[in-house]
Image (cartoon, rainbow, N blue to C red):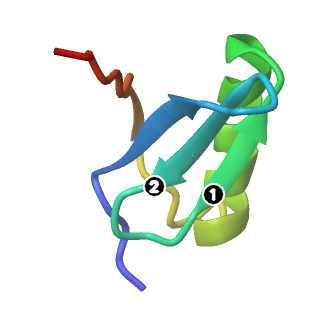
Amino acid sequence: MGTPKEVVFEVTEAVEGGFDARSRGHGIFTQGDDWAHLKAMVKDAVLCHFGEEFAPKVVRLRFVKDEALAM
């Protein structure tokens, strides 16, 4: 397994509160009760997935807010 330069997570608000984070292209999913907890959980999940030797140097969190407007 090669070392990716970065991993990008799409973050959404969880229905039950907190946040859900899903990586693009790596099959990693985690959750956090608040933003600080989410960041810690993402770091842990990335290290568990890749191992310390192959972990990327950068992890990006992209917050996605999906909102529908009635017309």
Between 71 and 52, which is closer to the camera in this rendering? 71
Q: Is residue 33 left or right of residue 27?
A: right
Residue 67 quadrant: top left
Q: Which label belongs to residue 23?
A: 2
Q: Amino acid at mark 2?
A: Ser
Outermost residue toward the left? 71
Q: Is residue 43 left or right of residue 64?
A: right
Q: Badge 1 local density, few (<14 within 10 Å), some, or many (20+)? A: some
Residue shown at the point (41%, 40%) measured from the top left: 10
Q: Quadrant of the C terminus?
A: top left
Residue under numbered circle 1: 29
Mark 1 vs 2, N-terminal side = 2
Outermost residue toward the bottom? 1
Is residue 61 shown above or below 71?
below
**C-alpha span from label 1 to label 2:** 6 Å
Measuring from the top left, give residue 63's x and y in whole percent. Answer: 40, 24
Residue shown at the point (66%, 26%) measured from the top left: 39
Is residue 4 shown above or below 37?
below
Between 20 and 57, which is closer to the camera in this rendering? 20
Where disc 2 sits, the SS reads strand
Measuring from the top left, give residue 13's x and y in whole percent. Answer: 59, 26
